[in-house]
Image: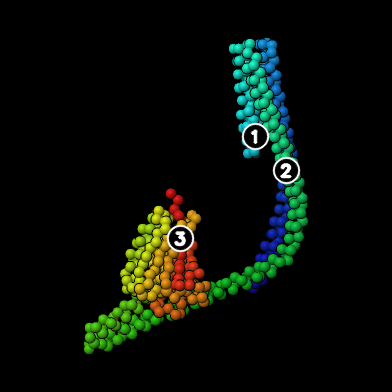
Amino acid sequence: MGRGISLLRGIVISALVILGFILFSAYSSFQNAKRAEFASQWANHTYDVLWRLDHFYSALQAASSHQRGYLLSRRKILLIRYQRSVANTQKRLAEIAPLISDNPRQQSNWLKLKENTEDRLKEADQTIQIAQKYPLEKERRRQAIKQGSHLMSQIRHLIAQMEEEEKRLLQDRLGSEEVRAKKLMLSILIETFLAVLFLSLSTWIILNQIRQRDRLQKEKAQLNADMVSMMTHELKNPLTVIYSSLAALADVRKSGSLDENRHILDIALKSSHRMRRLIEDFLEIQKLEYGAIEFKISEIWLSSLIKESLEAAQTYAMQKKVKLSFKDNYPESSVNVDSERFLQVMANLLSNAIKHSPNESEVEIESSKNGDRINIKVTDHGPGIPAYFKSRLFQKFSRDSHESEPGTGLGLSISKIIVEKMGGTIGFDPSNSNGATFYFELPEASH
């Protein structure tokens, strides 16, 4: 029944998709007409720019002609016409600017054109002033006129560049619109074919999705069952030890010695501590995975955090007769992290390194910069990571069966989630054959 409903739902979805294809085809046709209108607008825009460039240059030429006429005849009417032509030139130049505001290359050309035009008009004004002040000094006027001719040549060159750019843009736009139109027709044909194909395949796809969903639900249920079974097994061992210890303590409390009672209590205490750690780690990883823990991110000096983590691990290291050393290759670095969570990651890595280190050996901690990230490495000189275990290092409840000291198998999983939540990555160095090297990288804080 449920599968039949899903099949009907798939057919309805297919029909809706086909309707969507039809609507899209109509929309594509509308867009095609709209693009043709845009192409016409762009053509008109290009012709407008070319027309205004031509009128600008004509106005500038008129100003130059009136200037030369005034220099030769000293007729005041030519000076007045020159001044009007200058105003018209500036007006025409300003009209071009908004038409090319969408093209950075044309804007750059326009700024050069404006600069050369201002220089040309300034030179023309200075030439007139020289003629008025030194009417007999022909050489000065000749040099000024020569400079003006050079500037006009540069202006003609810039105008030619701008005209070529506008023509190129028009060709590109018209060409791209033609390509779009062809692609649109092709897309309509393809969409029609896909609609028919989708109708044929949709039922199979939906049924396959249903089967996949059922399989994932079964896998999830099996995973939950495995996790409960593992938790039950892990909790059963310490509970059995606690129960046996308390039962033995009850038997010897009348006749047993104080040392014997204390030994039994130590066993019970260690087992209860392990059970508590297992429960705490399990709850911790559940909260992290579901985002139920708030990270209090702040900028902190990295070296101070690492030194604090070393102080916290010192007692365990002394018990194992292991030396801790810290090499700070980038002492000025700071990171944006939750300090408590950072210390938790360091505690996990350090405790693992110390646990696997032989007596009188050294655990080395090193920080360095890798691009815009800070790298923290923890290296021990123990037996290393077995090849068969490397792929499962960061999985939940993963433990090497040959470990002498049992753990929860959650420390590295928790560390991985914490580091990733703080924008970093964590891993190990597979090339280290003389021990194990774990590292994690975090983004450096921007000052």
Q: Quadrant of residue 216?
A: bottom right
**Quadrant in which the N terminus appears:** bottom right
Asked whether the residues under the numbered discs 1 and 2 touch, taking CB atoms below 8 Å apart as contact, a structural biologist would say no
Task: Specify whether residue 320 is in view.
Answer: yes
Task: Give the residue pinned by disc 3.
Answer: 375
In the rendered image, residue 245, in percent from the top left (x then y), is placed at 31, 83
Question: Residue at 72% across / 36% down in the picture?
Answer: 164
Secondary structure found at label 1: helix
Distance of label 1 from label 2 (alpha carbons): 19 Å
Q: Earlier in the sequence, mark 3 or mark 1?
A: 1
Question: Residue at 69% across / 15% down in the picture?
Answer: 69
In the rendered image, residue 8, in percent from the top left (x then y), is placed at 68, 67
Q: Specify the label residue 109 is tagged with.
A: 1
Q: Mark 2: which amino acid?
A: Asp
Q: Mark 1: which amino acid?
A: Asn
Q: Earlier in the sequence, mark 2 or mark 3?
A: 2
Looking at the picture, the colour scheme in use is: rainbow
In the rendered image, residue 269, in percent from the top left (x then y), is placed at 31, 77
Residue toward you, 408 or 130: 130
Q: Left of 441 or right of it: where is 191?
A: right
Q: Quadrant of residue 48?
A: top right
Q: Specify the label residue 172 is tagged with.
A: 2
In the rendered image, residue 372, in percent from the top left (x then y), is placed at 48, 54
